[in-house]
Amino acid sequence: MRLGAQVRQTGGFLAALRRAEEMGAEVVQLFVQSNRQWRMPERGAGLFEAYRAAMDASDVVSATVCHAPYLINVISTDATTRARSFGSLVANLRAATALGAFALVLHPGSHRGTDAGTATLRIAKTVVAALEEAVNLAGTTCDLLFENTAGSGGTVGRSLAELRALIDATGGDRRVGVCLDTQHLWASGTSFATIAEADALVAGIADAIGLERLRCLHLNDSKVPLGAQRDRHENLGEGAIGPGPFRALLGHPALQDLPAVLETPGAGNGPRKEDLVRARELLEAGLAARGRGASPAPR
């Protein structure tokens, strides 16, 4: 398992890459535009080329993943927001591809009372159209990964079944996959507190969406209890999930080829080097526990 982090981007992409290297992150997650505005910054092709070259030369970071802005809601009831969301999604796919990212992570959206089935079809149709429009001169685009949600309001993607429905509605497009967030799983009522529960979760992923569709993990503890249906991240081992469940899940053999990204608060500015160290300790303990055939130690 390659462990990484969402990294502060003050100073630009290359500065973020340097921070990731200093942290010991094997994977770096970036936003290609501000979460607070629709406008994509103007950037020359040279900036993207420089980032890809630096990535290729890095002895630490081996992969980049991008996250779409939280403003995007392709099934908004407001026509202006829908149009802006589509344009932003296309622009983010193009920028992520130019950076050499393997995927762009997207929150599916909130239907705000629209029929769930209709909302699913609209999301899928929009995503496929965006992927087609974003294709570069080489005829490629990065993958798009639907992220599961914590379950509040009218969000889509609260369960493995809803994620499966989204994938099916795209016609099984090979460019579409899933990124699972551990805090969102917990908040939506999915426990992985023991090896047995973690195994059941992974088996459920295999049955519902296929392990080949699971292409990234977001590793976050939770400020809220199991089933609270709120998106509130905490540092690993310091929240309602605690270290035991992370050992149980991270040690699963079927997950070992995945990139896993911390989106924890750290001391207020995002993940720190010590948070990655903690993640590696939990991973190693989980692997050891499974090697011994024992359950992870209690919290």
Image (spheres, grey):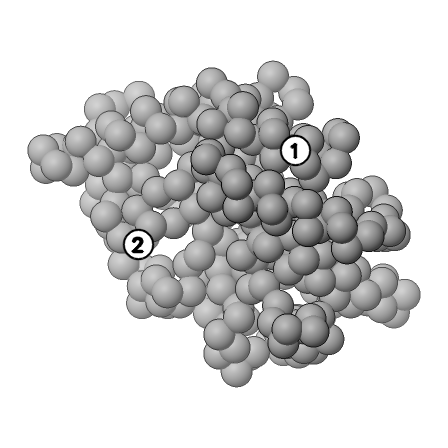
299 left or right of 35 in image: left
Q: Amino acid at mark 2?
A: Val
Across and down, in percent, residue 289 comes to: 17, 32
Q: Is residue 194 visible?
A: no
Across and down, in percent, residue 200 comes to: 26, 53
Residue in the picture at 56% in, 78% down: 170
User: From what the image shows, is residue 263 above or below residue 71?
Assistant: above
Q: How many marks?
A: 2
Tell me the tag on residue 16.
Answer: 1
User: From what the image shows, is residue 48 above or below residue 291?
Assistant: below
Q: Is residue 1 visible?
A: yes
Residue in the picture at 42% in, 59% down: 214
208 left or right of 11 in image: left
Residue furthest toward the left? Answer: 292
Badge 2 density bin: few <14, some 14–19, many ≥20, Cα 10 Å:
some
Q: From the image, which quarter does the C terminus lie in?
A: top left
Badge 1 density bin: few <14, some 14–19, many ≥20, Cα 10 Å:
some
Tell me the tag on residue 164.
Answer: none
Q: Amino acid at mark 1?
A: Ala
Across and down, in percent, residue 179 comes to: 49, 54
Tell me the tag on residue 202.
Answer: 2
Q: Which element type, helix, strand or loop, lies under badge 1?
A: helix
